[in-house]
Image: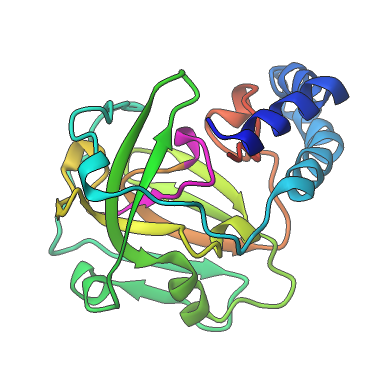
Amino acid sequence: MNLIHIQRRQFLKISGLSTLSLLMGGCGTPAFEDIVGQLSQPLNHQVGELIFNPQKPVPEFSLNEIQPEALIVNTFRYTPIIDLEKYRLVVDGEVNNPLSFSMAEIQALPLTSMIIRHVCVEGWAAIVQWGGISLKEIIALAEPKANVQFAYFKSADGYYESWDIASVLHPQTLLAYQKNGEPLPVDHGAPLRLASPIKLGYKQSKWVTKISLVSNLSPFKGYWEDQGYEWFAGL
């Protein structure tokens, strides 16, 4: 856990925003959630933006620091069965050029590799090498409209997440299809998963099938966030 993360947690604690977000996020009824989204989300987003540098790379690790067995498998509901011959990554929403990629098309794009620390909200961490396509390259191909501020990620197991667009475009945010130099295992999110050193683990969706670029968030911001977890979840 780095100094920036500690400072951010302290700031949230002092401001009361972390507790406010947790309290409001668990209030239950859809009607109330609409109001809560309007009240708490902008604060949560703005506080994160005060500390987050969207283009500053996070220091990486060396090959001999990789911890092959440290990455714990957390499954939301089940491990989905995905037919790679039929698999498509869809990019839609407020874009000028909607996309639909096969895995062969994804893997034909330039490969980016990084060795970073994956941090789980449960208190454990693992140094992992991820390889895949830089997400900002996919977004650029979709030609997002000028008002886009967020991205929604849909997964094959029903999991859903949303990110701020600055974090999506960070140079170390990947759609990964390799882990530690090998093809990504299914239980870790194959064929594609999010990987980034700037977000907690629950933001890093596995089995990603769809990315929707939008100008506003719906009341449903993420599986865990809708149960009270922090939305920005930056490191």
Bounds of the magenta segment: 192-203
- The C terminus - image quarter: top right
In the figure, 97 relative to 212: above or below? below
Q: Nearer the viewer, residue 191 or 112?
A: 112
- 232 on left or right of 59: right
Give x and y (percent) for residue 175.
Answer: 36, 58
Q: Nearer the viewer, residue 202 or 234?
A: 234
Give x and y (percent) for residue 231.
Answer: 65, 36
- 104 on left or right of 74: left
Residue 201 lies in magenta, yes or no? yes
Q: Name which residue lies at 72% across and 28% down.
A: 30
Q: Name which residue lies at 38% across and 46% down.
A: 116
Res. 18 image quadrant: top right
Give x and y (percent) for residue 24.
Answer: 77, 21
Q: Name which residue lies at 23% across and 61% down.
A: 87
Q: Name which residue lies at 18% across and 29% down.
A: 69
In the figure, 33 relative to 98: above or below? above
Q: Nearer the viewer, residue 11 or 199?
A: 11
Q: Nearer the viewer, residue 144 or 1?
A: 1
In the figure, 21 relative to 87: above or below? above
